[in-house]
Image: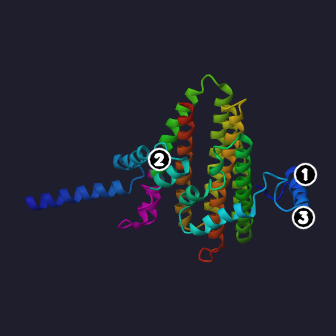
Amino acid sequence: MMRSVAITLLFLVLTAAHARAQSDEPTAAERKIIADCLDKNGGEDELKEMSACIGLVADPCPNAPGANTMTIVFCQTREQKIWDDYLNDWYGEAVKRLADEPDAAAALKEAQRAWIQFRDAKCGYWEKRYEGGTFASVAAGNCMRATTGQRAIEMRTILDDLSH
Amino acid sequence: MSLGDDTGIDMKRIATALGILLLTSSPGRADDPFEPTASERGTIDKCLKRTANEAVLKQASTCIGLISDPCIDKDTATAVGCQERETRIWDDLLNKAFQDARAHLDSAAGGALKDAQHAWIAFRDAKCAVSEKEYEGGTMATIMVADCKRTETGRRAIEMQAIATDAEATIFAPR
């Protein structure tokens, strides 16, 4: 009896872990991986920081056991969400700091609007390039993740610049 | 970046053409401080070849800045000249990669790539205008805008080279 309970529990735990791995919500551990990298590389040149911190969650996914298109796309989405949260926080903070400079604040808002259009057009290309294939979602997901990460780090550079 | 559908007269092109005419009579690039030297083009080219198999972001962090970074503590005119020359190198590479990619894509993907480039130009200009507003009135604004255009053009050139390589790959040939 105890044994079958243990097996059932083990099964439940494994199912939960499995569900977690297939989710498109970032885990606390995944958020921490990115946060630690940003702390470690703070003050580094923007491009160096990008090459060190972008991809930490998604890059290992194609080699994970049982990886398939869906798990890879979920990994991409989870990392994208982490960067998108940073981007929103840092953008909001930068706009706040520009309260006394309406021209610069307006320029930043305009740049963000232009970035969203560029991101969609840039990643939309991959949908067309691989239209009809499962690879389209992987390529487009990869593009959304990397592009959001780049813009998040750029936004932090803008914010750091405003804080001096 | 030119998308091949510009009908207006490009003053920069004319200036470059004049520069070429001048160069035929006098050696060196002395007449156009914004024209990259052959050795500067070679520096970027060698870096791209050396890092060819690295991810786009790693390649960008290694190869962007090779011409302008050594000029960072020079006077404004020199620093801006270095920025501009590096921007031209990346812009030429971007144009070439864009044409290479287009040559291998079907009309749907080719159209999407052209749309992406239009959106990129708008984003580049809007992004670099933030530096202009932030440092309005100062010489720093000139440097920061030139820095922004150089980095952004370099990054897009490296992305476009990856797009061209993918477009040329027969394994995922377009329908």
Q: What element carries label 2?
A: helix
Q: What element carries label 3?
A: helix
Circle 3 is placed at which residue position?
B24
What is the three-letter code of the residue carrying label 2? Answer: Lys
Please say if the residues under marks 3 and 2 sit with CB atoms less than 8 Å apart. Answer: no
Residue lying furthest bottom: B170
Name the N-terminal-most of marks 1 and 3.
1
Q: Badge 3 sits on which subunit?
A: B
Q: Badge 1 sits on which subunit?
A: B
* Residue under the point 46% across and 43% down: A42
* Residue under the point 60% across and 27% down: A98
Circle 2 is placed at which residue position?
A81
What is the three-letter code of the residue carrying label 1? Answer: Ile
Q: What residue span does the magenta drawing correspond to?
A: A56-78
- The correct choice, above or below, for B26 with respect to A147 in the image is below
The answer to which image quadrant residue A66 occupies is bottom left
Count every numbered label the image shows and give the total: 3
In the image, are marks 1 and 3 on the same chain? yes
- Residue B9's disc number: 1
Q: How far apart are marks 1 and 2 (CA)?
A: 44 Å
